[in-house]
């Protein structure tokens, strides 16, 4: 998959994918060509600039129409965006409203899952509480991925892996359909641990064991694991 947006703002502005139809097509067509040329499986829309809900809605509908139903569409909201309905988050729109409107003709959600950022003061991966809060708001656990920092140098809100592991195990027990984990970033994952650093592949193995160790005993296989 490929990610579009993030902290480097501008992808969704009025001068690009957030513009009128002419401007939108000028930026959308090269994106579409890029996705098809490299045969990506999907795209993650990480909107970290204030836009109207119609901006991601138009893009999601266009991608579903042009890339087909098997193409994976995900988004990367901060945790509070799935906790509050006031639209006060770094995307500037209400994700509850977006999710209700972003459906195909059969009523299926266009967004397959949300790579949710539980760091930078938007959510805490050190306990299950922030994730539980989102579940109480009616979100499907299969569609909410726990996003964590993998290294204290990658931002603020870092939680040591041992505590993340405990959170994962707790959530897996409470929500059998728990959506999985993503880590930002991979290249330095696990290297800043207080009790001794690990190589990135070892960090992935630790997280995998927290996820699939429980799953193997339950016979469940639908969990996502990714890095951004």
Image (spheres, rainbow, N blue to C red):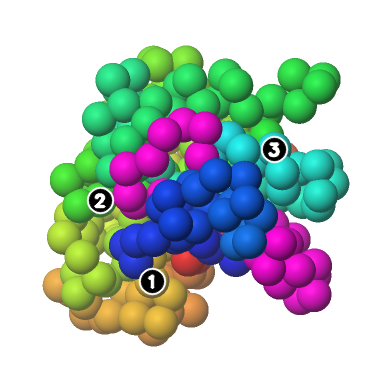
Per the image, label 2 sits on a secondary structure element best described as: loop
Residue assigned mark 2: 119
Q: Position of residue 62 (x, y in %)?
A: 72, 44
Magenta highlight range: 29-55
Nearer to me, 108 or 225: 108
User: Mark 3 touching mark 1, by CB under 8 A?
Assistant: no
Please identify the quarter of the rendering in which residue 39 is found: bottom right
Q: Residues within 10 Å of mark 3 (few under 14, many from 20)?
A: some
Q: Nearer the viewer, mark 3 or mark 1?
A: 3
Q: Nearer the viewer, mark 3 or mark 2?
A: 3
Decide which of tag 3 and tag 2 comes sooner along the chain.
Answer: 3
Count of numbered labels shown in the rendering: 3
Calculate the distance from the C-alpha at mark 3 to the C-alpha at mark 1.
29 Å
Nearer to me, 52 or 47: 52
Q: Position of residue 53 (x, y in %)?
A: 46, 31
Nearer to me, 66 or 122: 66
Q: Is residue 228 magenta?
A: no
Per the image, label 3 sits on a secondary structure element best described as: helix
Calculate the distance from the C-alpha at mark 3 to the C-alpha at mark 2.
29 Å
Calculate the distance from the C-alpha at mark 1 to the C-alpha at mark 2.
13 Å
Q: Is residue 46 magenta?
A: yes
Nearer to me, 174 or 86: 86
Per the image, label 1 sits on a secondary structure element best described as: loop
Q: Position of residue 191 (x, y in %)?
A: 28, 80
């Amino acid at each position: 998959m490929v990610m579009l947006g993030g902290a480097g703002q501008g992808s969704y502005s009025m001068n690009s994918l957030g513009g009128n139809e002419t401007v939108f097509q000028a930026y959308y067509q090269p994106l579409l060509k890029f996705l098809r040329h490299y045969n990506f499986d999907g795209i993650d829309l990480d909107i970290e600039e204030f836009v109207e809900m119609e901006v991601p809605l138009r893009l999601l509908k266009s991608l579903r129409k042009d890339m087909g139903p098997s193409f994976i569409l995900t988004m990367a909201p901060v945790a509070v965006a799935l906790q509050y309905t006031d639209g006060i988050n770094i995307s500037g729109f209400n994700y509850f409203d977006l999710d209700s409107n972003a459906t195909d003709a059969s009523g299926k959600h266009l967004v397959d899952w949300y790579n949710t950022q539980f760091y930078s003061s938007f959510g805490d991966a050190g306990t299950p509480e922030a994730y539980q809060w989102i579940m109480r708001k009616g979100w499907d656990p299969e569609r909410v991925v726990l996003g964590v920092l993998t290294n204290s140098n990658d931002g603020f809100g870092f939680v040591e892996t041992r505590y993340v592991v405990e959170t994962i195990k707790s959530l897996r027990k409470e929500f059998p359909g728990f959506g999985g984990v993503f880590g930002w970033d991979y290249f330095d994952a696990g290297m800043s641990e207080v009790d001794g650093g690990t190589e990135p592949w070892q960090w992935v193995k630790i997280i995998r064991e927290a996820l699939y160790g429980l799953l193997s005993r339950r016979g469940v296989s639908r969990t996502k694991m990714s890095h951004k």
